[in-house]
Image (cartoon, helix red, strand yellow):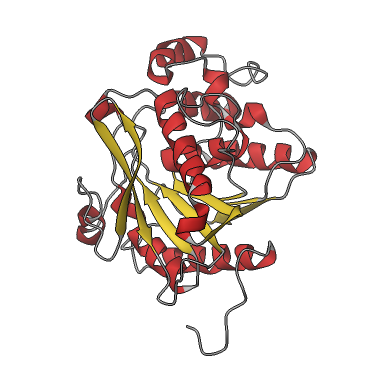
Amino acid sequence: MRNQMTFAVILVFCVLIPGSASSAEMGRLRYPPEMPGAEAKVYKKVNNVELKLYIYKPADWKPTDRRSAIVFFFGGGWQSGSPAQFRPQCEYFASRGMVAMAADYRVGSRHNAKVADCVADAKSAIRWVRQHAAELGVDSQKIVASGGSAGGHLAACTVMVPDLEAPDEDHTISSQANAAILFNPVLILSREGLSDRVPRQDLEERLRERFGTEPKAVSPYHHIHPGLPPMIIFHGTADTTVPFETIRLFAEAMKKAGNRCELVPFEGAGHGFFNFGRGDNSAYQKTLELADKFLVEIGFLAPKRQSEP
């Protein structure tokens, strides 16, 4: 019964509520975003909508550099949210030598977008970074996708979900990220193959319109196969919005397929625990520390010098 309830919860995931956000967090939920110090570049135009990447470069950046890059996708249930959510993480990784970016994308409340549209935008953002790697001073084979909640879902999709590409782009340029760092992501959005644990078929049927495509097409779990890029997942064990058991199932399946997938549980933590301004910031600091370590291990970052904080 517990498993049935767990998977039923994930299928009624309509709008993610950030939880009891602090005033500092609320400031980063404003839209349009306030991104001091960032360079804004339009990576995609859809009808009259311009979607931007907010780019933070290291202090010693040069156009001839070939640095690793990281692209963050905000949370908000594919319905709302702001790129400013990940401004602190962008500033941190830029200080560590990466070209760090926060991506805007279409959402339901502002653009009547479906989940499939959000996925297409995320893929467009990764493709744009790879296409413009030379002018960004980026190594086109060291692009990391990251994000929280629905944004974590989008980051995972850029790593492992095929199709759902914007039709008018150069598909010879890959939209696949080379690694992923995920914060309480949504990774299971279909009952297929899990029907014995998800008895409520009507839930999936009601959400089908929200997806804009078949649920399996936007469900990262259903696209696990050998040879995927490495990823790390940070998730609270007390998350009632995206239950921890669903993430554990995903991580186990990834490892079974021979992929590197690290799941880092945060005991007793709820949804959105990783955000800057949440509590005493200890979870924010710890996730940054472990994400940094992960990037060093996969060769995307140099180890910290002793003089660095």
* 65 or 267, nearer to the observer: 65
The residue located at (33%, 49%) in the rendering is 41
The residue located at (62%, 49%) in the rendering is 178
The residue located at (36%, 32%) in the rendering is 78
- The vertical placement of 45 against 296, above or below, is above
* 119 or 224, nearer to the observer: 119
- The vertical placement of 277 against 259, above or below, is below
Q: Position of residue 204 (x, y in %)?
A: 48, 15
The residue located at (46%, 26%) in the rendering is 166
**In-image side of 34 versus 107 (left or right):** left
Q: Quadrant of residue 18?
A: top left
**In-image side of 28 versus 307 (left or right):** left
Residue lying at the far bottom of the rendered structure: 307
Q: Quadrant of residue 279?
A: bottom left
- The vertical placement of 206 against 263, above or below, is above
* 68 or 82, nearer to the observer: 68
Q: Position of residue 126 (x, y in %)?
A: 50, 43
Q: Is residue 237 visible?
A: no
Q: Position of residue 238 (x, y in %)?
A: 48, 47
- The vertical placement of 73 against 266, above or below, is above
The tally of labels here is 0
**In-image side of 194 versus 54 (left or right):** right
- Look at the image and tell me in which quarter the N terminus lies: top right
Q: Quadrant of residue 27?
A: bottom left
Q: Is residue 82 visible?
A: yes
Q: Position of residue 5 (x, y in %)?
A: 52, 26
